[in-house]
Image (cartoon, helix red, strand yellow):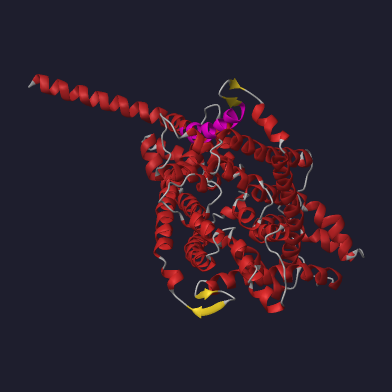
Amino acid sequence: MAELVMGSIVRKNWWYRLRAFINANLINLFAGGLFALLAVFLLYPIASVLVFSLWGDQGFTLDFYAEFFKYEFYYWSFLNTLILGLATMIILLVVGFCFAYLTTRGPLWIRKPLKMIALLPLAAPPYIFSISLITLFGKNGMINNLLHLNFNIYSWTGVIAAQVLAFLPLSYMMIENVLNAVNPSLEESASDMGASEFRIMRSITIPLAAPGLLKAALLVFVMTIAEFGNPAILGGRTPFLAPDTYLMITGEADFNMASVLSVVLIAPCILIFILHNFVLAGKGYTTIVGKPTATELRPIDPAIKLPFLIVCIPVTILVLLSFGVIVFGSFVKIVGVDNTFVIDHMLNTQSNLAIWNSFKVSLGAGLFGAVVGTLLAYVIMRGKFPGRHLMEMLALSGFALPGTVIGVGYIIAFNRPPFLLTGTIWIIILNCVFRFLAVGVEAGISKLHQISVEIEEASADLGADFLTVFFKVILPIMFSAFVAGFIYTFMTTMMSLSSVIFLVAPGFDLASVYIFLTAQLGELGVASATTVKVIAIVAVSMALLKVIAKKTGLDVQKQGV
């Protein structure tokens, strides 16, 4: 009997010591585990791309880079990618500014409709515009046939137009956010002193909007050169880095040159980031200082309004037409050629199976990504260990790097032991988790900024240990950030193409890959129907995200991620 009592006491003491150790070191244990995940599933794939670009059968070599600069094809691929990025960036700075200026300074009746149009492409995958432009301006396109045109959409014009329409929301949101932050009394004072609206815009509005303009330029450039679908579908024979990287792997199985193309794709992104920080360094743009301001609505000068409307109206028409023909094309046999109503495209078995696969992957990525993002945010905000800023930088890097690079990195890193994931659903889930992790982390950090550490200290003073405080106080308060991270990761995974197209196994179709392949084969009806179903799922996700943001005060779009 005494032995049993002693054994029970020893077990209890062991449990109490273990609980005390966990209570004292849980945040450091979380940090160690999360850093290991970041190292394996983000740092390791990126490093693998760099190593493979410098490592051949004989060891270290620069031969692959020499080959890149030797062949004219690769040179033009790189140059075309830069031209595409710069052209789209410049156009979207102008278009985005026109939309943002009219929705913040224009007549009240036009503000909400224009804002809705500018944000509408968020609900759709970027490659929807390739399909719609082919439907409108292809060889048998509706507008080409209607107006008897011979316009070739498989050209620079088509690729740039698709990219502009796809990434309009990015440019608009950044610029609109900073224009809303400009103190209106500055513009009103200048107007009272006799300055024309054009001079006010040139001397006050645009200089103060510089951070938003630069961030918009940065994001548009990076997203444009990384976008895979539009250049691949509409590029024709014009080479671009992202599609060429895909062909290098699927066609030639040359991982070394694919790695070189990926590194070259990263280089301009890093250069743009450095340039962005250098331009903004040491400059102040604060115009809101906490003092209330009251201004009257100023009528916009017709000399400003008319040119801005001339820019916005054609873009608005193209956005609406693009969505319209996608929906219309889902229910007719061959849109523009044989407009007989059919339901076959919507009931296509292979399409529905691809959407179901995407739903499973997106659900897994959303749940896992939300958990990791919430824990990372807590560790970064409440941890006292060195390296917290490094962890945050790593967590955000997946969002900043081109999806093509992450996709190539995962193929190289996880196609052999000890991390043999190639051909499984897990390689796709993990890729999407760590690629879109930034939003969940930033949402969690923003929420923790609103939570005073005194709440945790008060709970501890009342006798609650760390585990109790974490699970009963912190996690319930951060639940809105968890849900926001889940929904964002879910809906972006549903639409993602540039990285997952490298990772899908034969016989396992994802909706985004299926849409891309059917569009390339000219099966626009099936591609349109699949796109409509994906848009419906994404639209529901965005509506949920908006409701959560409204009820909790958490607006992910305004985090700048």
How far across and down, in percent of the image, does residue 266 sit?
65, 39
For this view, does 69 lie left or right of residue 5? right
Position of residue 333 relative to residue 411, above or below, is below
How far across and down, in percent of the image, does residue 554 sit?
54, 54
Position of residue 488 relative to residue 310, above or below, is above
Splitting the image into 4 quarters, where does residue 109 fall?
Answer: bottom right
Position of residue 6 relative to residue 391, above or below, is above
Splitting the image into 4 quarters, where does residue 347 fall?
Answer: bottom left
Q: Residue at x 81, y 57 (%)?
A: 205
Is residue 56 covered in magenta? no
Quadrant containing the N terminus is top left
Task: Using the rendered image of the protein, determine whether residue 448 is visible from the camera's viewpoint.
Answer: no
Q: Main secondary structure of the magenta part?
A: helix
For this view, does 423 lie left or right of residue 56? left
How far across and down, in percent of the image, does residue 80 sit?
72, 47
Task: Using the rendered image of the protein, determine whether residue 64 is visible from the camera's viewpoint.
Answer: yes
Instruction: Specify the segment rendered in magenta.
Output: 37-54
Q: Residue at x 63, y 47 (%)?
A: 226
Q: Nearer the viewer, residue 125 or 159?
A: 159
Is residue 45 covered in magenta? yes
Splitting the image into 4 quarters, where does residue 519 fall?
Answer: bottom right
Q: Residue at x 86, y 57 (%)?
A: 202
